[in-house]
Image: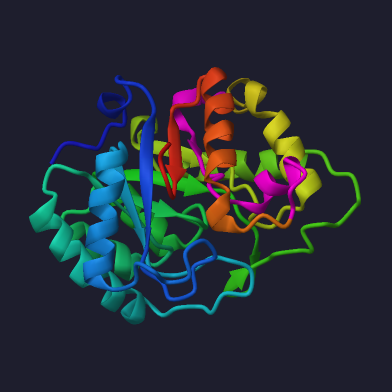
């Protein structure tokens, strides 16, 4: 199989990766699509709305979420992947996982892209990425043991984007250093993963310069802001529930598109 290349998917305007949460504790939809029937119905809705790829995840990464073992993760994913392969054979699938065992099982069922929120920091995941032809999405995040470091988001201390940019640069260098072709790779800045609002705001304000700062083209980033609290606080509506933030999400996508960004991971498509 030829190595995955994002280029052919980026010629017709924005590429929306429709998020399909298969967890009972998602921050955005509270497990509404955890069952195969509901997940398949939501997948159809996302594709009809304009999703060019579906991104399936079975471990919540919200603050305080329970860590899920690979076998449990796969038990949630496998029936949905099988149903989607039969019902939507023309839609490429992305698998949101940080476990090499889950990733390898997914690739064996036809998954085209692996999306790792830990930036392929696990040596087994990096080896899998290097030795498979799949597409890759690598996100910057901060860890706390087996989970994620999530500081108080409303910490008032001023922050710039330098640490987050250095972490994202390290993710890029790790994958390129493993011999992975840049055409296979998208970088995700990781809004909200170990950052405070002040740091996210600085990172957002750096987006127009990010391709130059990282020597990485805008179309090779994946922007993952959908329904995040950053959007609600930036809009002066901090109490707005996640499922009511789709309008703010669409506004952010439109802003980022003006700066050349083309790939957006999102729960809903305007």
Residue ID at (81%, 45%): 198
Would you say residue 208 sits in the magenta stretch? Answer: no
Residue ID at (54%, 65%): 27
Outermost residue to the left: 86
Looking at the rendering, the stretch of residues picked out in magenta corresponds to 215-238
Would you say residue 233 sits in the magenta stretch? Answer: yes
Residue 145 pos. (x, y %): 63, 74
Residue 167 pos. (x, y %): 65, 46
Q: Quadrant of the C terminus?
A: top left
Q: How many marks?
A: 0
Residue ID at (44%, 30%): 220
Is 1 positioned to the left or the right of 243 in the image? left
Q: Place residue 109 in its image quadrant.
A: bottom left
Residue 33 pos. (x, y %): 34, 67
Q: Is residue 61 above or below residue 177?
A: below
Q: Quadrant of the N terminus?
A: top left
Q: Is residue 57 visible?
A: yes
Q: Is residue 176 visible?
A: no
Is 108 positioned to the left or the right of 135 in the image? left
Is 38 positioned to the left or the right of 222 in the image? left
Residue ID at (8%, 57%): 86
Residue 51 pos. (x, y %): 31, 40
Q: Nearer the viewer, residue 140 or 82?
A: 82
Is 122 positioned to the left or the right of 131 in the image? right
């Amino acid at each position: 199989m030829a190595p995955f290349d994002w280029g052919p998917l980026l010629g017709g305007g924005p590429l929306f990766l429709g998020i399909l949460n298969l967890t009972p504790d998602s921050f955005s939809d509270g497990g509404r699509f955890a069952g195969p029937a509901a997940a398949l119905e939501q997948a159809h809705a996302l594709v009809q709305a304009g999703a060019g790829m579906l991104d399936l995840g079975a471990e919540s990464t919200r603050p305080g979420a329970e860590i899920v073992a690979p076998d449990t993760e796969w038990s949630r994913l496998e029936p949905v992947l099988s149903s989607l392969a039969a019902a939507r054979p023309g839609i490429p699938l992305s698998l949101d996982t940080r476990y090499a065992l889950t990733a390898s099982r997914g690739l064996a069922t036809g998954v085209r892209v692996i999306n790792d929120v830990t930036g392929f920091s696990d040596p087994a995941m990096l080896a899998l990425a290097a030795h498979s032809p799949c597409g890759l999405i690598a996100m910057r995040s901060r860890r706390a043991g087996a989970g994620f470091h999530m500081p108080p988001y409303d910490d008032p201390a001023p922050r710039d984007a330098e640490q987050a940019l250095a972490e994202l640069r390290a993710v890029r260098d790790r994958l390129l250093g493993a011999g992975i072709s840049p055409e296979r790779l998208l970088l995700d800045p990781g809004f909200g993963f170990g950052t405070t609002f002040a740091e996210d705001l600085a990172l957002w304000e750096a987006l127009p310069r990010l391709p130059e700062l990282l020597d990485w083209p805008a179309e090779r980033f994946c922007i993952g802001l959908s329904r995040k609290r950053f959007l609600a606080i930036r809009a002066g509506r901090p109490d707005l529930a996640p499922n009511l933030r789709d309008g703010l999400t669409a506004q952010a996508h439109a802003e980022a598109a003006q700066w050349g960004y083309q790939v957006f991971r999102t729960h809903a498509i305007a």
